[in-house]
């Protein structure tokens, strides 16, 4: 049965003591969830020491950069998370689409490193992960396993990445650099939506008690860290925008769902600002929308199942975006002809042009789903839709070359740019967008039964309990309890910056 990672007491004192000794030797200090949510609370001495560490260095202090408040240099801490506001020239809609920038996260340039920390740190401080003998296994379609390998290395533990062989070449190149042993990168058959094959591999690996599987689809630390950190970060961005325009309203939070961790931020934004929550998937694999399945290229999302940590009952909309759209707009946003078209014909500002390399495939998917929602709800200039750019375009150079050769063999010129923009951005419609009724939510929720109860052995009562809002609100005190344990653990190691 997959674990939920929710324990908040010391489970094994021997393991705990060994972790304390290892962290003391390796000089690893752990940030609390509260510090990652509000990094200005990180002690001055830590911040000073961090200034001498580069953001992509395998240095334990980089754990204190695993938050949304890194500056454009990815090094300095800033008061407002990195974001870009997309206007009508790019999106064709009046509503403001504000995108938080995942590229500023350390080591992997994607916010999935936050999810990885939130899964491993509670295990360490509750004596469930022994860094002297366990291997942290990170099943994912790409970024979470990179985040897991990075966090494991910073914590002096061994991390193993399990990902489909069809993921981008750049992901594998990064992993080869970061793992301590090449055997710690395990490629499973298939591509983006072949999650079952990853699970099968993990089931096999878990036969060895030295392997601890961190299943992001069922680890509630993943939900909680996004509720607490990503939700608060987007809230800060919105409040910052409101300083200049007091009438702005936060109408929705849009997030393409892989593990559904990021969607946890939606619960926070709904609670604080009344935002509605939009879960997005690939049209070629419309699991939430139509109980469908299939292959697609929006890397990081859409895994043919409903994650255990998805609060389906609070999901207000489901949207699907075609991977043809994200493939072609990824070219538009990177090719010289595309940029020249956006500047010359659309009048897109230099600030927005400069942000385009920060948008990977799922980021473009989030933007397109936001455009669809803005049209459906008839949103105007005072309406804000918040979303995230989980990773940037740099992970997809090889993908762009493949897409260009496949779909634009004569080259991506300005006519191709205009076609791509007209078809996929201006032409984004309100089709493939479902405003969910209670029955829709129930259907989506119940679909999870087959994965979690039938395949993975979660007790049906635990599965069913997640329908009630009180289950999710009840989880939220966990991070305070973990923070207290993190403080105690740091006290035991005695590590200071
Ligand atoms: C590039 C990318 N986008 C989106 C997601 C989905 O985020 P989440 O797993 O929090 O739903 C992921 C997850 O790995 C990702 O790597």
Image: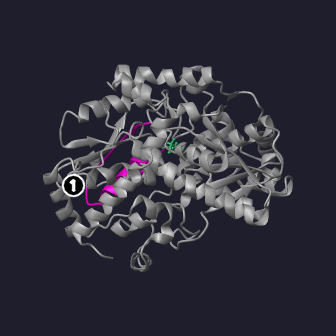
User: Which stretch did the figure color magenta?
Assistant: 142-168
Residue 66, can we see it? no
Q: Is residue 74 left or right of residue 149?
A: right
What residue do we see at 51% from left, 49% from top? 227
Pick whichever, 452 or 25, lies toward us: 452
Relative image position of residue 49 (x, y in whole percent): 39, 78
> Depth check: 52 or 192 in front?
52
| Res 244 quadrant in image | bottom right
Please say if 130 is above or below 60.
Answer: above
In depth, the one of 149 and 464 nearer the eye is 464
Residue 218 seen in this snapshot:
yes
192 vs 265: above or below:
above
Label 1 sits on residue: 131
Q: Image check: 51 left or right of 286? A: left
The residue sitting at 35% across, 54% down in the picture is 481
Whether the magenta-drawn stretch holds residue 105 is answered as no
In the displayed structure, would residue 221 be above or below residue 76? above
Front residue of 161 and 244: 244
Figure disc tally: 1
Identify the coloring.
Answer: one colour
Count residues near mark 1 (Cα–Cα under 10 Å), then give few for <14, some for 14-19, many for 20+: many
Residue at x-position 51% and y-position 41%: 300
């Amino acid at each position: 049965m997959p674990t939920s990672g929710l324990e908040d007491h010391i489970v094994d004192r021997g393991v705990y003591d060994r972790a304390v000794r290892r962290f003391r030797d390796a000089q690893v200090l752990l940030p609390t969830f509260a510090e990652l949510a509000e990094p200005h609370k990180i002690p001055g001495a830590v911040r000073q020491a961090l200034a001498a560490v580069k953001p992509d260095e395998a240095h334990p202090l980089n754990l204190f950069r695993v938050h949304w408040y890194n500056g454009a240099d990815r090094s300095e801490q800033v008061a407002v998370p990195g974001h870009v506001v997309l206007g009508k020239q790019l999106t064709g809609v009046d509503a403001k689409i504000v995108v938080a920038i995942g590229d500023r996260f350390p080591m992997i340039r994607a916010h999935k490193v936050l999810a990885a920390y939130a899964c491993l740190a509670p295990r360490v401080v509750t004596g469930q992960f022994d860094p002297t003998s366990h291997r942290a296994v990170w099943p994912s379609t790409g970024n979470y396993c990179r985040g897991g390998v990075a966090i494991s290395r910073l914590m002096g533990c061994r991390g193993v990445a399990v990902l489909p062989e069809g993921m981008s070449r750049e992901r594998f190149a990064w992993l080869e650099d970061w793992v301590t042993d090449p055997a710690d990168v395990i490629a499973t058959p298939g591509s983006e939506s072949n999650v079952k094959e990853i699970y099968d591999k993990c089931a096999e690996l878990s036969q060895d008690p030295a392997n601890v599987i961190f299943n992001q689809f069922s680890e509630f630390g993943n939900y909680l860290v996004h509720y607490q950190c990503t939700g608060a970060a987007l809230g800060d961005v919105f409040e910052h925008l409101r300083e200049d325009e007091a009438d702005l309203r936060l109408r929705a939070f849009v997030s393409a769902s892989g593990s559904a961790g990021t969607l946890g931020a939606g619960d926070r934004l709904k609670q604080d600002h009344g935002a509605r929550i939009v879960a997005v998937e690939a049209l070629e694999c419309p699991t939430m929308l139509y109980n469908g399945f299939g292959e697609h290229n929006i890397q990081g999302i859409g895994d043919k199942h409903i994650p255990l940590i998805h609060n389906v009952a609070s999901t207000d909309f489901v949207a699907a975006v075609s991977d043809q759209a994200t493939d072609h707009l990824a070219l538009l946003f990177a090719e010289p002809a595309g940029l020249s078209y956006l500047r010359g014909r659309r009048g897109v500002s230099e600030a927005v042009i400069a942000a385009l390399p920060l948008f990977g495939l799922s980021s473009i998917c989030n933007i397109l789903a936001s455009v669809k929602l803005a049209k459906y709800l008839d949103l105007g200039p005072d309406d804000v839709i918040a979303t995230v750019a989980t990773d940037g375009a740099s992970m997809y150079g090889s993908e762009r070359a493949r897409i260009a050769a496949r779909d634009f063999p004569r080259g991506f010129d300005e006519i191709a740019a205009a076609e791509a923009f007209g078809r996929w951005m201006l032409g984004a419609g309100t089709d493939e967008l479902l405003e969910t009724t209670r029955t829709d939510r129930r259907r989506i929720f119940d679909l999870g039964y087959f994965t979690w109860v039938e395949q993975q052995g979660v007790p049906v009562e635990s599965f069913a309990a997640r329908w009630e809002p009180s289950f999710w609100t009840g989880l939220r005190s966990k991070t305070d309890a973990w923070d207290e344990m993190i403080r105690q653990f740091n006290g035991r190691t005695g590590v200071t910056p």
